[in-house]
Amino acid sequence: MAKKKYTFIDLFAGLGGFHLALEQLGCKCVFASELREDLRKQYEKNFKIKPFGDITKVDIKKDIPPHDILCAGFPCQPFSQAGKRQGFDDEKMRGSMFGYICEIIKEHKPKFVFLENVSNLMGHDGGNTWRVIEDKLDILGYDIEKEVLSPHEYNIPQHRKRIYIVGRRRNGQNKEFEFVFPREPIMPEGTTIHTLIDESDTNYIPLRDVTRKQLDLWSEFINKTIANGCTLPGFPIWAMEFGATYDFKEKAPAFQSLKELQGKRGHLGQKVNGFTKEACLAQLPNYAQTDKSEVFPHWKIRYIEQNREFYKKNKKWLDKWILKVKDQANSFLKLEWNCGNDTPTLEDKIIQFRASGIRVKRATYSPALNLVGTQIPILPWVQLPDSTKKGRYMTVREAASLQGMKDMDFTGLSKGRVYEALGNAVNVEIVRLIANKLIEC
């Protein structure tokens, strides 16, 4: 527990991960802000404090009281690899939210600052974004330390890298700020995703029949690969490339002539027979249609080569399999096998349907909870309590457990909204560990 009952403010609060962590340490929240109305209502329900809405409309002097700790998981979209990566130039001004944080710090001069963001913050814009943040906090009078941490480093079964930034205000009296981020495991060694799975939970989202069919098709692919003496590729499997013959090494298809494109084979080996260049390009795999560069990047050339070579070795059975998947959307024609030499089955893995393809991981750590509710991890081995079938999505309560929020009230929010909010939340357990050490400085 904190020796002193520190006060804190919770900016861009979301579900209230910072609040929950610091409250457990005996600290008191005196102000919160959250733009989204449904999350403000949820926050008030859980913490009995109503967050302010638009932080850009707040009167920093009148609306925000004095406080000891400023907490902020400020908007990550401008810095995330999944976003447009515009940083402080983000068109919707999300990047400038850090500017409002600085204005609040300048006015109230809290003893500590505690910030969280995506790990890509460090490398954004060649490191310039981080240098701006570091310089601004230094000018405001704060010594800071940073660390990229993931829950799995604390035996919490989730891979989710985030950067944590802590700072203490210089006052001429305190000793040098030598903050070392805590590394003590929270859960026992050997904890896996199975530890948090509750197979008796009836509040789950079942797999649709079409999803089961897609998983069956890829199970067949895996079984046939092994049966024919091959190992599962370590590179991303791009089924659209099977049977393709279009040229791609010297010049990207978008920069080729109509004559160069016609007569080749494109998506799933179908013949390219358009009467215009645009029509021909539309018959290629979607990743081959880009006109951003006259020459494909090396990684894309390598993946295309690897997939074509795999097709040549397995053409005999792949041609029959292709007929079964020819009507599937592009995202279902990609498979990322991230399991190495593990048992070549899907039944005991964690599966995630992503825009980039179907990702398969060992059932040890969950992938990072995603902002998109449609990318909820699938647990194929779970026996459904009210059915003879196996396989379902991770439940809200299981996802909340991964974020240290299992006891929070989510009533009033749809399942999809909760998953989205959890994907954008700070990890309570890690925040609590860091905050506990910070307030002792």
Image (spheres, rainbow, N blue to C red):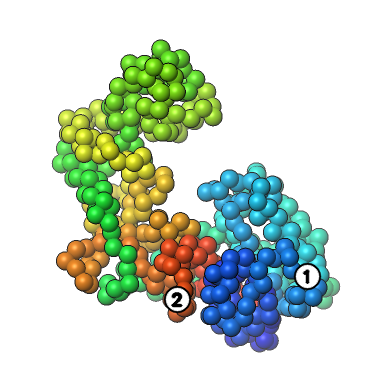
Mark 2 element type: loop
Mark 1 = which residue? 59
Q: Is residue 343 left or right of residue 168?
A: left
Query: Farthest residue in the top direction?
Result: 259
Mark 2 = which residue? 411
> Could you say which disc has been placed on residue 436 in the image?
none
Identify the amino acid type marked 1.
Asp
For the residues labelled 2 and 1, the Cα–Cα distance comes to 32 Å
Q: Is residue 409 left or right of residue 388?
A: right
Residue 119: give x, y in percent of width and height.
56, 55
| Residue at screen point 58% across, 53% down | 77
Neighbours of disc 2 within 10 Å: few (<14), some (14-19), many (20+): few
Residue 307: give x, y in percent of width and height.
32, 32
Q: Is residue 410 left or right of residue 346?
A: right
Which of the 4 quarters of the picture holds residue 101? Answer: bottom right
Q: Quadrant of the image for the C terminus?
A: bottom right
